[in-house]
């Protein structure tokens, strides 16, 4: 393996991300009102960022007032520039950023596995929302994404090589299955603190999942809001079609240098059929069954 990859507390990191994790562990102090968005890369992080932003700010932007909706930050910026990742944007390279300008509830994202979260995140009453996606689609999405990244990142391999590595646990913030399990178990043990969402369920029954999320965060939709179509409005605002077509997401870049459009590829469930051979499917399904089967976690 390249020397720029590190195994820390059971998970793989490139040097830059590991520095961010260590510095977040050292400096970050959670507040009870904080909300964390957690995921494995390519599980729907961008989408969940948009949904959380729209949900929490819904009283400020509404559809009947077109101008207000057009002013919505989600229509001007990529969600990654609105909800910052601890390890890749805030605590990069050992820094200790000033977070005093963040208003409550503070919204953060991270790919840090449960075991490595800063202690204050586990100890405070802050809420954690985990987005997870079926391992086959996550892998295919990751493969496309990492091919576009620099050689220093995990990404210059053929599909077969990348698949073998993914299955052996070697992927950004991987092993994939251990990452999911950490949060899944936490959600079973602390349902008031950790909400476990699935990309596939969000696609299949978005309004049900959105209401579940709102209830969990203590900001349920009122009857009037539901009657006014606010749930559907948020789903539409955050949909793949809507966000991916925005000028900012077609041509803009993140401060990290990633192109905004690289976070919007197909946005579908089951694209893996176009990439994985029957042998690959058998292998990855077997791992998923071995890791998740006992806990009844299925995709
Ligand atoms: P695909 O590569 O399968 O299309 P992340 O945000 O965690 O990096 O995940 C990116 C994946 O989520 C990509 O999957 C991307 O297309 C998909 N995605 C981005 N925005 C989405 C949205 N609004 N609705 C559904 N999927 C979305």
Image (cartoon, rainbow, N blue to C red):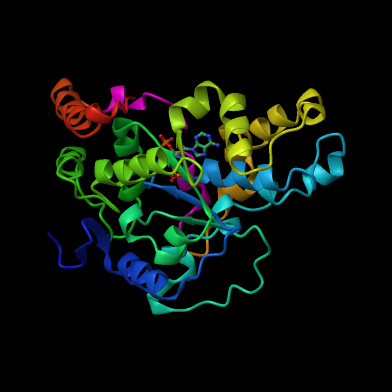
Q: Is residue 281 magenta?
A: no
Residue 262 placement (x, y as % from top left): 45, 47
User: Residue drawn 35% across and 51% down?
Assistant: 148
Asked where in the image residue 22 lies, by quadrant, the reply is bottom left
Q: Is residue 267 magenta?
A: yes
Stretch of the chain drawn in magenta: 257-275
- Residue 117 visible within the image: yes
- Residue 266 visible within the image: no
Q: Which image quarter is the N terminus in? A: bottom left
From the viewer's perspective, tell me whether residue 71 is left or right of residue 287: right
User: Residue drawn 41% across and 25% down?
Assistant: 269
Q: Is 70 located above or below residue 292 in the figure?
A: below
Residue 19 placement (x, y as % from top left): 33, 72
Residue 219 placement (x, y as % from top left): 68, 42
- Judging depth in this view, the residue of 160 and 167 nearest the camera is 167
From the viewer's perspective, tell me whether residue 122 is left or right of residue 101: left
Residue 71 placement (x, y as % from top left): 78, 49
Q: Which image quarter is the C terminus in? A: top left
- Judging depth in this view, the residue of 295 and 25 nearest the camera is 295
**How many labels were placed on the picture?**
0
User: Residue drawn 76% across and 32% down?
Assistant: 222
Q: Is 83 located above or below residue 233 in the figure?
A: below
């Amino acid at each position: 393996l390249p020397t720029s990859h590190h195994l820390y507390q059971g998970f793989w990191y490139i040097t830059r991300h590991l520095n961010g994790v260590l510095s977040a562990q050292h400096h970050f102090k959670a507040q009870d009102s904080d909300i964390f968005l957690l995921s494995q890369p390519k599980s729907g992080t961008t989408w969940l960022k948009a949904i959380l932003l729209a949900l929490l700010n819904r009283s400020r932007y509404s559809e009947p007032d077109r101008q207000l909706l057009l002013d919505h930050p989600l229509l001007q910026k990529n969600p990654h520039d609105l909800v910052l990742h601890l390890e890749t944007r805030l605590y990069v390279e050992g820094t200790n950023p000033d977070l005093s300008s963040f208003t409550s509830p503070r919204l953060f994202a991270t790919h840090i596995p449960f075991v490595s979260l800063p202690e204050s995140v586990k100890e405070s009453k802050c809420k954690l929302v985990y987005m997870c996606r079926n391992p086959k689609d996550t892998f295919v999405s990751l493969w496309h994404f990492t091919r576009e990244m620099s050689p220093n990142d995990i990404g210059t391999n053929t599909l077969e090589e990348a698949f073998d590595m993914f299955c052996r646990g070697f992927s950004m913030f991987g092993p994939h299955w251990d990452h999911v399990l950490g949060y899944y178990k936490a959600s079973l043990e602390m349902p008031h603190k950790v909400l476990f969402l699935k990309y596939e369920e969000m696609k299949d029954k978005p309004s049900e999942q959105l209401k579940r999320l709102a209830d969990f965060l203590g900001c349920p939709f009122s009857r009037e809001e539901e009657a006014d179509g606010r749930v559907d409005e948020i789903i539409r605002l955050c949909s793949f079609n809507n966000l991916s077509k925005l000028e900012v997401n077609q041509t803009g870049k993140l401060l990290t240098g990633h192109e905004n459009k690289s976070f919007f590829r197909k946005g579908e469930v089951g694209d893996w059929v176009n990439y994985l051979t029957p042998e690959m499917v058998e292998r990855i399904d077997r791992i998923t069954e071995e890791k998740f089967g006992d806990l009844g976690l299925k995709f």
